[in-house]
Amino acid sequence: MSSSIERIVLDTNVLVSAFLNYSGAPAQVLTLVLAGELKLVFDRRILDEYAELLGRPRFGLDSADLTEVLRQLEADGERIAAPASAVPLPDADDLPFLEVALSGRADALVTGNLRHFPGNLGVDVLSPRALLQRLEAEQ
């Protein structure tokens, strides 16, 4: 268990939840990232997935707001090159998030789908609520 959380990887479901419910734990996590209190670690695959999913019409998000948030995440975060991994996950689409978390030495991978990251994967996998609780405990 990490003693301090500073660098995180955000699963796309956390961002979607943050945009759809401004008062929930995912939105609080996004606010901490945008405020520079947490460093987002990502690669191009993750940014592309953020843009593709959040840009879907069914979410009805304002494209200017979305573009600005994604621009800030990219500008303030840390882009890394993550080598491919053969770790078996229930959903292979989640592999880039794990690869980036491991290669970028993230303190946590934050997801709303904990069951997609089973077992000891070499990085703490936390729900947004669990991340907030850990951060509060560190204070």
Image: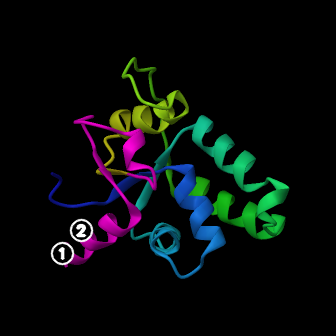
Figure quadrant of residue 46: top right
Q: Which amino acid does the dot numbered 1 rest on?
A: Ala
Toward the top, the furthest residue is 86
For image coordinates 27% across by 60% down, the residue present is 5
Q: Is residue 130 left or right of residue 85?
A: left
Q: Which amino acid does the dot numbered 2 rest on?
A: Arg
User: Which residue is nearer to you in this view: 54 or 43?
Assistant: 54
- For numbered disc 2, what is the local secondary structure? helix
For image coordinates 33% across by 35% down, the residue present is 102
- Label 1: which residue? 137
Residue 130 located within the stretch drawn in magenta: yes
Q: Is residue 124 above or below residue 63?
A: above
- For numbered disc 1, what is the local secondary structure? helix
Q: Is residue 115 above or below residue 77?
A: above
Q: Is residue 22 left or right of residue 91?
A: right
Tell me residue 7's x, y (percent): 35, 54
**Where are the magenta residues, as a range?**
110-139
Residue 43 badge = none
Tags 1 and 2 touching, CB below 8 Å: yes
Tell me residue 47's x, y (percent): 63, 45
Circle 1 Cα neighbour tier, 10 Å, few/some/many (<14 / 14–19 / ≥20): few
Colouring method of the image: rainbow
Tell me residue 48's x, y (percent): 68, 41
| Cα distance in 3D space between marks 1 and 2 | 5 Å
Q: Is residue 25 left or right of residue 56?
A: left
For image coordinates 40% across by 36% down, the residue present is 98
Image quadrant containing the C terminus: bottom left
For image coordinates 75% across by 70% down, the residue present is 65
Residue 38 located within the stretch drawn in magenta: no
- Label 2: which residue? 134
